[in-house]
Amino acid sequence: MRVVPLLPLILLSAAPAMAQGTVCTPPSTAGRQQSPVDIRRAVATPLQALATHEPTEAGRAFNTGHTVRVDVAPGDSITVDGVPFALVQFHFHWPAEHELLGRRYPVEIHMVHEGPGGKLAVLGTWVRQGAHNHAWDELWAHLPTGADTVPVRVNVRRMFALANVNGERVYRYCGSLTTEPYAEGVTWLMRRTTITLSPAQIARLHEVMHRYSRDVQPLNGRTIRYRPPAE
Ligand SMILES: [Zn+2]
C-alpha cells in the first residue's frame, strides 16, 4: 500500500497552519493551564519551523527585588506559526521552574516576547552547571543589586546559543505566567538544549537574587509538542 506513507503529507497540506498551530489563546475556563510543568511526555508533530531574528541590541539590566531582568531595545523577535513576537525582556529563575522528567536544573532564563494583541510567547532556556560561559561576562560584571539600572549590550544569539534553534528540540505547550497574575494563554517554548554557567557564575547570581521559582503545576490533559529537529 503506497497510500500509507502519503498520509502525513496529506494531513500537512490539508490542515491550515492554524489547525496544527502552537500559538495559544486564553482558555474559556481559567486555572487549568498553569505553568511551569514537568515535561515527561511530548509528541513529535509536524509544526512550522521557528524563525528567530537576533541582532545585537541595547539592553537595560535592573534588579526587580525578585530577579535580575534585562529590558531589550526592539529588534529581536521569534516567529511562531507565522506570528511574529518581539523580545521585550529576559529574566532569571533559580532553581529552574520547568522540570524534565522530574529533574530541575539550577537556573532557567525566560525570554518574554510580545505578539499581536498583547499575546505572550516565552522562550525558556535551562542552565546546567558546567563550563564558564563568556557570553554572559558583560552582564555578570554589572549584575544589578539595588535600584541601579545598568546599560548592557545584548547579544541574544550568543548568550542563548540560538544559532540553530530548529536543530534542537523545543517543547511547545499552552501555559501561563509563572508569577502573579498567572494569566493563561501564554505560548511556551522550552528548549531541550541547555546552556552552561560555571559554579562561580551561578553563585554570583545567588548573591544578587533570592530563590525565585514556582513549583510545577498539573498538565490537566494538555499536550506538549515538539517539531522533530531538522536533520
Ligand atoms: Zn519567568
Image (cartoon, rainbow, N blue to C red):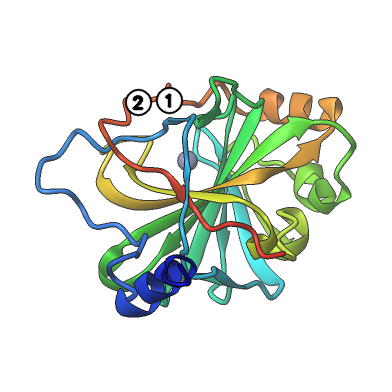
SS label for mark 2: loop
Report which quarter residue 196 is drawn in. Answer: top right
Q: Check mark 2 vs ligand 1: CB closer than 8 Å? yes or no.
A: no
Q: Residues within 10 Å of mark 1 (few under 14, many from 20)?
A: some
Quarter of the image that includes the C terminus: bottom right
> Would you name the residue on which mark 1 appears?
214
| Amino acid found under the numbered disc labelled 2 | Gln
Residue at the outermost front position: 1
Tell me what residue is drawn at x 10 percent, y 41 percent.
29
Q: Residue 9 location in percent, x, y? A: 44, 74
Is residue 154 among the parts visible in the rendering?
no
> Would you name the residue on which mark 2 appears?
217
CB contact under 8 Å: marks 2 and 1: yes
| Amino acid found under the numbered disc labelled 1 | Arg
Tell me what residue is drawn at x 36 percent, y 58 percent.
120
Relative to 142, 63 lies left or right: left
Q: Is residue 164 above or below residue 65?
A: below
